[in-house]
Image (cartoon, grey):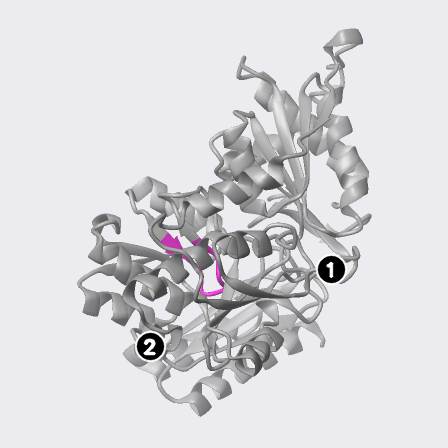
Amino acid sequence: MRKLFGTDGIRGVANIYPMTIEIAMQVGRAIAFIVKDKAKGHRIVIGKDTRQSCYMLENALAAGICSMGVDVLLVGPLPTPGIAFITTSMRADAGVVISASHNPFQDNGIKIFSSNGFKLPDIVEADIEDLIFSQKMAALRPVADEVGKATRIDDAKGRYIVFLKNTFPKKYTLDDFHIVIDCAHGATYGVAPHVFEELGAKVTTLCASPDGKNINHECGALHPEKMAVRVKELGADIGLAFDGDGDRLIVSDEHGEIVDGDHVMAICAQELMKQRKLKKKTLTATVMSNMGLEVAMQKMGGKMVRTAVGDRYVVECMRKKGYSFGGEQSGHLVFLDHITTGDGILAGLQLLAIMKKRKRSLSELAGIMESFPQVLKNVRTAQKIDVSTVPGFPETVTKLDKQLGNSGRILVRASGTEPVIRVMVEGQDEKVINDIADELCDLIRKSDGS
């Protein structure tokens, strides 16, 4: 059983176990211990989002790393993919991100990239937990000039901005685009406006004034409605909403209609196939992606493979099978030919390049895919539970699954980051799938005593 790590690093309420400075310092020591074992340059990048609690966790991580004789490179607030980029660009041994992504400000998290910019596999995270709880590092304390030091990389933001701009075709500009950007008061606030403005776009920026407590609050990729309304009010061409750490993107078309990650994947996959850059003509998505995306890929002459929920599992599948593009309905979009993880700003640039090249609006491009009706409901529980142990639950799912037949599906899973059970039902009749979702949610609530 995992003690610290979930589907995307360690996450919880800041200053409450496991997101305490004590655990953060031990995580820092463990990462340093592992990279020192590789007998090469010993430097670890630390970046963060805009949460108030990032300061204390940043200092604790840096202290733990330095105490093991490894140097720290501090880059400050920067999107998660930016930290992955800086890690590889600086030839560092690892990169650490302090962020709880789309969670509210009181939460925080720690996720780790290896030297190649990819998130750590489960086995290495298990090694980190073992080092922390086995006390194997207790006697290892470098002294005198063997301890590490921390250095701030002041131009990290500029380096990342240049990288992003270089992913946009050099023959195009954004001179004739009006873009509304919602930075979620998060890590993209100091990057995204500059990228699109420097490429020539007229930019209207929303939610780019972080105060340590307003990250993700009624804004960003989880709450793109205000951004969409603003697009329609201003007559803008597109709206781009990022989450707190900038690794996901939700889009609005020129009419103020939300375009989710599935539709963006369909648009990008089609263009990549035309350019013969979609390796093996395969799109990698998760079990949460709409069945309509599968249908769209088949019509293009390609195919779609599914993974467990989480961009790390999408990336692992892509690397293992030799695929080049994938993502999640929630807006994690991974262009492996450009970067090693989901990147909201980069995804926005690729989408805009397609609009520019094909001279079509986003609403026209989004017509490539027709979504099946889908409902997603969350049940918050007193503690994490295994739904397979809920009396009558497996039997009920089997019965309802037969009711849907081949024209729909049911997916029930526990969140990897919080005590929430997610119930997703997909089918052709909206009333039927809502009734099925409600029935399953009621069963879970009754078993939890809610």
Q: Is residue 89 visible?
A: yes
Residue that carries the numbered disc 1 in the rendered image:
209
Where does the image place residue 345, in percent across and percent down from the top left?
Answer: 51, 54
Does the magenta portion include 320? no
Q: Is residue 187 above or below residue 37?
A: below
Residue nearest the observer in this picture, 182 or 250: 182
What's drawn in magenta, residue-wise? 326-333
Q: Residue at x 63, y 41 (%)?
A: 97
In this rendered view, identify the residue nearer to me: 125 or 157. Answer: 157
Image location (x, y in percent) of residue 430 = 43, 88
Residue 241 versus residue 30: which sits nearer the camera? 241
Q: Residues within 10 Å of mark 2 (few under 14, many from 20)?
A: few
Please report the residue visible at 51 percent of the width from the left and 40 percent of the height from the top.
Answer: 119
Q: In the rendering, at what x and y percent does residue 131 appear? A: 66, 27
Whether residue 286 is visible to the viewer of this picture, yes or no, is: no
x 38%, y 71%: residue: 290
Seen from the viewer's position, the closer of residues 125 and 252 is 252
> SS at mark 2?
helix
Up-down: is 323 above or below 380?
above
**Image-quadrant location for residue 369:** bottom left
Amino acid type, residue under disc 1 in the picture? Ser
Residue placed farthest to the bottom in the image?
431
Residue named by callout 2: 364
Image disc number at residue 268: none
